[in-house]
Image (cartoon, rainbow, N blue to C red):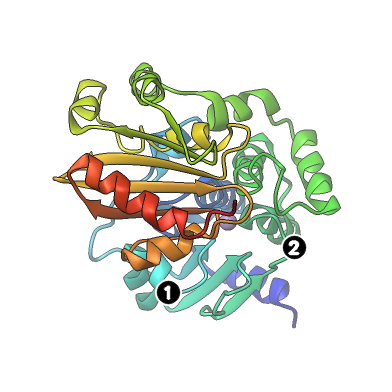
Amino acid sequence: MSVLDSIREMVQKAKSILIITHENPDGDAVGSSLGFMHGLLKLEKEVDVFIPKVNKMFSFLPGFDLIKNELPEDASYDLCVALDSSDLERLAEGRKWFEKIENTIVIDHHITNQNFGDANYVNAVASSTCQNIIVVLAAMEVAINKDMATCIYTGMLTDTGGFRYNVQTETFEFAGMMMEAGVNIAEIYRNVFDLTTEARTRLLGRALSRLEILENGRVAFTYVTADDWNEFGNQDGDHENIVNYGRNIEGVEVSIMLREKDGQYKVSLRSNDYVDVSIIASKYAGGGHLRASGFAVPGPLEQAKETVLAEIKKQLKD
Ligand SMILES: [Mn+2]
């Protein structure tokens, strides 16, 4: 029996289903959870989506208000579906439910997936878990409606950085199917990439007013203080995009953004072509990727700046 057949059968047998995903859920995690929820509701299942903490930027997604931030200890389900998560640890708070519920399904697109469910549909060529949800819904003979498509298209859009990375020709075929189901392309794009707040924009303005270009144009540097943070609203994630403005400047290889927090400085680094910022992050017990990383260094500001600059200079080419 194929995995898709097993999944269809497990869903058929289940009356109540719990959907979970990874912590700090992105558009693919929230989109696949809600998209799959809508599909299972069509099959007249009792469905809960459990996400302890979810960014309200996704509140435009149909069904967002149905997300449960907590579950009663004595809740019980016939089936648990884990989405966009490569292993049990990624599930964080959801893990105990996954381990407690008797039947489990994993749907994902990470090549590192540990196949930790009873049935595992992992297609690592897919742009996103959302794209794999389309295949699973088709196998269950669920016709994709506008609500499902809106959630699914959102995950495809975010996981590909606006159809830039991780894109195959079939990605566009699947996106086209979502368009046929009626998604509002412009509205989703605006919600995901353009929409901001006054506080966020003013914080960005403060940071940009302090922008320095160093090392013969190869390094962009800026910072926000704890006072800026308090002045402009202090919302989770308000600073996140600032570092990209430095990276986008012609000639810049590395962009640095420091944020004062609890007496130390949180560092965001972005590079363009060759500086491996993950090496610097791991030296300071942080995390990240080749071209994007984060970690913390001690203050004061000038010292934090020098510490980070010294690390970057080790890798800068003439
Ligand atoms: Mn994903």
Point 19% across, 33% down: residue: 226
- Viewport quadrant of the N terminus: bottom right
- Residue 111, image x, y percentages: 63, 72
Residue 221 or residue 175, whichever sits in front: 221
Residue lying at 42% horizontally and 74% vertically, measured from the top left: 88
In this rendering, is residue 97 above or below 213? below
| Observer-nearest of 33 and 280 | 280
Does residue 19 sit above or below 204 in this rendering? below
- Decide: is 295 above or below 240: below
Q: Residue at x 43, y 33 (%)?
A: 242
Give left or right: position of 261 versus 279.
Answer: left
Q: Quadrant of ligand 1?
A: bottom right
Q: Nearer the viewer, residue 314 or 180?
A: 314
Look at mark 2 in the image and give the residue it sits on.
139
SS class of the residue under badge 2?
A: helix
The CA distance from mark 2 to mark 1 is: 26 Å
User: Is 66 situated left or right of 115 in this image?
Assistant: left
- The amino acid type found where label 1 is placed reads Leu
**Circle 1: element type:** loop
Residue at x 72%, y 42% (from the top left corner): 163
Q: Which residue is mark 1?
A: 88
Q: For the residues carrying marks 2 and 1, which lies nearer the camera in this image?
A: 1
The answer to whether residue 69 shows anywhere in this view is: no
Please determine whether, in this image, residue 117 is positioned above or below residue 315: below
Residue 140 in sight in this render: yes
2 and 1 marks in contact (CB < 8 Å): no
* Residue 285 image offset from top left, x and y in percent: 31, 66
Identify which amino acid the numbered label 2 is placed on.
Ala
Of mark 2 and mark 1, the one earlier in the sequence is 1
Q: Quadrant of residue 43?
A: bottom right
